[in-house]
Amino acid sequence: MIQRIQTLYLAIVIVLNAVLPFFVNLWVETENGEIFANNELVISIVFYAIAVLALLSIFLFKKRQNQFVLNRLNLIVNLFLLGFFVYRSLNLSGETAVSEKGIGMLIPVFSIVFLSLANRAIKKDEDLVKSVDRLR
């Protein structure tokens, strides 16, 4: 449902992962120049997978437990992507020529924060429904 706060958090995750990586550079190499998500096929697939998981999670608003589990799966995928970026940034610093890390490497961090906020809101909704069911 649109009026729930977790929908807003998940929409932010969708925008962060479906749009932003293709306009913000992930890193800069001396030979190839700026590297965006569309330059690396695997990275772009992972970004789109994260956005699709968040979109599916929005439409599971009637099944809060499944929505919670799907967000946790999305968190794990974001952690793997963040681990890859950390590994990649450690390899960039060992080059003979100077390379730069881009701001796009922080996208998984922001996604993790917003997915955690969405999970907290989903848990709060689930607790509210359980407390109302006890009164019946």
Image: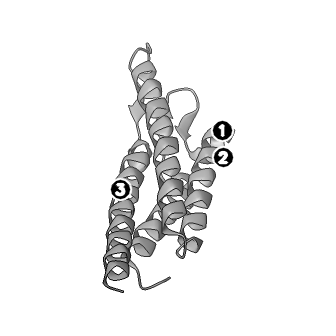
- Crowding at label 3, few (<14), some or many (≥20) Cα neighbours within 10 Å? some
Give residue 42's mark: 1
For the residues bearing labels 3 and 1, Cβ distance under 8 angstroms: no
Instruction: Looking at the picture, tell me which residue is in the foreground, 6 or 110.
Output: 6
Residue at image x 44%, y 39%? Answer: 79
Q: Nearer the viewer, residue 82 or 61?
A: 61
Give the colour scheme of this rendering.
one colour
Return the x and y of residue 50 as percentages of the image width and height: 56, 53
In terms of depth relative to the viewer, which is nearer, 104 or 131?
131
The answer to whether marks 1 and 2 mark residues whose Cβ atoms lie closer than 8 Å is yes
**Image depth: mark 3 or mark 1 in front:** 3
Question: Where in the figure is residue 59, as x and y percent of width and height?
Answer: 59, 73
* 124 over 77 or under it: above or below: below
Q: In the rendered structure, find residue 116 and report the number of the disc placed on it.
A: 3
Residue at image position (66%, 46%) is 45
Going from the N terminus, do you reach mark 2 or mark 3 first?
Answer: 2
Q: Which residue is mark 2?
A: 45
